[in-house]
Amino acid sequence: MIRFGIQDYEPHWLNGRDSIAAVHGRRLARLAGRALLHVWVVWDLEDDEWFTDAPVLLDFGDERVTIDHQKFDDLCITWDAVDPTRSIEDSYFNLVWRPDATPQLAELAGQTLQRVALLEWAGDRSDMANGSVAIGLDLSPHWLTIFNALDENGFGFGGPDEQYRAHYFDS
């Protein structure tokens, strides 16, 4: 399956903090101390905006991590599979990879990652997002959260929302 024409991107969806931590926790923890070179997003050239349905790529130079959300609680993390210099071959959308596409993302370029957190949403009892997992990046003094924005990806800047329970990895 090719998602949105992104070459070599074959998502494997996980749900829940425990399963995500079991599969990706150690590798996420090992990112601490590395410089985040770029945050790549897929850009819709027709609408001139971030195509939030496609994955976000964190470029640490020798390690590239894609983060992708769908539905209410699906999260996919892939490692070194996607090359943002390759064209996107989608037959419906006119998409390209764009590094540091907003001023807030551009501020993060070159910042050292202090630690990574899995952020578990804990809303009130009727909140459909309960248990959904976001990725939190402590780039002190900056912070980036990549979260599920109802079947697409969203960004949060500043510290994590207080509705999240933060689960940090030791490096």
Image: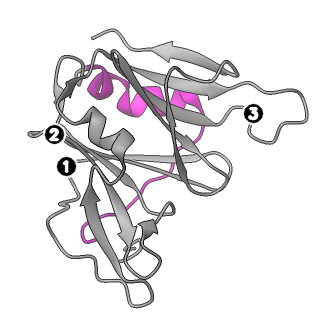
Mark 2 nearby-residue class (10 Å; few <14, some 14–19, many ≥20): few
Q: Which mark is residue 130?
A: 3
Q: Residue under label 2, please give it.
A: 63
User: Dot 1 lies on which element?
Assistant: loop
Q: Earlier in the sequence, mark 3 or mark 1?
A: 1
Residue at (36%, 32%) from the top-left corner?
24
The quadrant of the rendering that contains the C terminus is top left
How has the structure been colored for display? one colour
The quadrant of the rendering that contains the N terminus is bottom left
User: Dot 3 lies on which element?
Assistant: loop
Residue at (25%, 71%) from the top-left corner?
7
Q: Amino acid at mark 1?
A: Asp
Residue at (41%, 58%) from the top-left corner?
11
The foreground one among 117 and 110 is 110
In the current view of this chain or complex, which residue is farthest to the bottom?
Answer: 91
Callout 2 touching callout 1 (CB < 8 Å): yes
Q: Which residues are magenta?
A: 6-29
Question: Distance from label 3 to label 2 (Cα)?
Answer: 31 Å
Query: Which of the 4 quarters of the picture holds residue 126?
Result: top right
User: Dot 2 lies on which element?
Assistant: loop
Residue 62 is situated, as x and y percent measured from the top left of the image, at 8, 39
Q: Amino acid at mark 3?
A: Asn
Image vertical order of residue 99 relative to residue 17, above or below: below
Residue 47 is situated, as x and y percent measured from the top left of the image, at 47, 77
Image vertical order of residue 23 relative to residue 76, above or below: above
Mark 3 nearby-residue class (10 Å; few <14, some 14–19, many ≥20): some
Q: Is residue 13 magenta?
A: yes
| Residue 146 left/right relative to 91 | right
Question: Distance from label 2 to label 1 (Cα)?
Answer: 6 Å
Q: Residue under label 1, please give it.
A: 80
